[in-house]
Image (cartoon, helix red, strand yellow):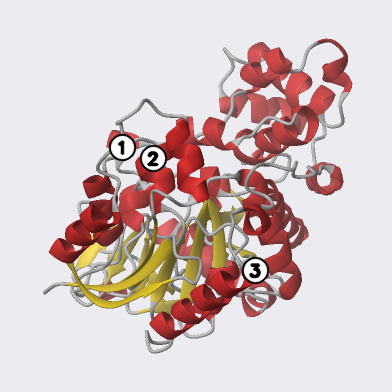
Amino acid sequence: MTPSVPYPPDTAVRAEPGSFRDPANRVFQAGDDILRGLREQAAQDWRALAATDFFPPLIAAGKICGTEQVASDRVPADDGGPWAAVLRHERIPFLSHPAEWSFAMLRDAALLHLEILAEAVPAGFTTKDGSAWNLQFRGAEPVFIDVGSFEPAREGEPWAGYRQFCQTMLYPLLLQAHLGVDFQPWLRSRVDGIEPHQMRRLFRGVRRWRPGVPTHVHLHDSLTNRHAATTGREVRGQLRHAGFSREVVAATIRSLTRLVRRLDWEPPATGWSDYQSTCGYSAADRSAKQQFVDAATADAGRSALVLDLGANDGTYSRIAARHTGYVVAVEHDAAVVDRLYRQLRAEGERRILPLVVDLADPTPGAGWRSTERAGFVTRARADVVLALALVHHLAVARNVPLALVVDFLVGQLAGAGGRLVVEFVHPEDPMAQRLIANKPAGLHADYRRDTFERLLARRCVIQQRQELPGGTRTLYLGTVRD
């Protein structure tokens, strides 16, 4: 697994908080390098894996993250002694949580996991687990990152990752495909996903006959309960005695693949799905805004990371991507993100990553001590932040004080010189008026342009200010003060 915290600016080797669960290997950060220390058995498994016919083509195709062996002294010895081998992995531009993915993103990640497993099993390999955390995205392309999960398969044993696959990928997909229930809050609440007994309660009556539910929910839960008092070693012995084979594992993988491919969810129309045509912009406003963003990002640099907060259909993400290295397009509406992802996937776009994040309630830290998986605010430090038609939604619709909104936006920049491209929607704008009308009188008396400019000037040097032709919206380009 790759890091869940920002990469350190120096070359000090630091253990990744989210990689402690497998004692056979551990992931570290050393500046821009992502390193994995392997114990002796894991090192042997790696050498066998690298020598197979199936593994190198998957790396070459970008389906598994780029990996190479480097000098073992790159990672210092720890309490377990010197590392038997050290690998260096490709750096993923931005690390996301499965709870931040849309339906199509999770489905594509699940299908890639199954595709890799289907290649590995005939070659005598399997994966120790089947978690959604084993994958990340390069733009609209999933990539498998947990190389340390591969190990030689043992004849007569089932896929050890089946339960995790169900809990973190299949069950969330079933929830959304069959019930229309957003899975993101479920995955956000538990890093280990949804338990079989929870799913069973949701799929009662006629629902229990939906595709995939009888076998992977009800039967799975029944077998779990039946073997609750039986050790894993005893269960594996019983399966071997019953003639369980590698062919059965391969058949299970094929069946899961067919099921996941059939699952689908049509994003419903929401208040945000047609926002570009309902937000009140004139053609002149829209053109001026696009030109402003284009100019503000033109010389940001090909290595720059951009956060487009409140990205909607990705119009401004695409503009920023012309000039920069990578854009994270954040939107709270899962249906909007799903549509954008499908468009980007069809285009083969690898430099724009769409994510489902509510900026008024962003993804928190999760797992052990809430640091095993870093929260969104910790991960999302960028060179450029776009906050277009966003401030009024946070300040008025969500009652976040204007000063805190500005602090948040500036705080997501990586440091001095970072650029903030922000739009302030005046109180008299029809959209702002609609939001204010739903609030008690006087509640947002401080929501004014002069107040916003004063707060912004405290944190940034305002390099450029432009009022849109409609007269009720102003764009700013600010750079963080030294």
- The residue positioned 42% from the left and 37% from the top of the image is 436
Compare marks 2 and 3 and give the one earlier in the sequence: 3
- The residue positioned 59% from the left and 65% from the top of the image is 314
In the picture shown, does residue 245 fall above or below 3? Answer: above
Q: Position of residue 330 (x, y in %)?
A: 50, 56
From the image, tell me which residue sits under label 2: 396
- The residue positioned 22% from the left and 67% from the top of the image is 13
Element marked by disc 2: helix
Element marked by disc 1: loop
Element marked by disc 3: loop
Label 1: few (<14), some or many (≥20) within 10 Å?
some
User: Which quadrant of the view contains residue 424?
Assistant: bottom left
In the picture shown, does residue 275 fall above or below 439? Answer: below
Q: Nearer the viewer, mark 3 or mark 1?
A: 1
Amino acid at dot 2? Val
Compare marks 3 and 1 and give the one earlier in the sequence: 3
* Distance between mark 2 and mark 1 Cα atoms: 7 Å
Mark seen at residue 63: 3
Label 2: few (<14), some or many (≥20) within 10 Å?
many
Q: Nearer the viewer, residue 230 or 188?
A: 188
Q: Nearer the viewer, residue 155 or 412?
A: 412
Could you tell whether 36 is left or right of 344 in the image? left
From the image, tell me which residue sits under label 1: 444
Amino acid at dot 3? Lys
Mark seen at residue 280: none
Question: Is there any visible trace of residue 131 in the rendered image?
Answer: yes
- The residue positioned 86% from the left and 45% from the top of the image is 262
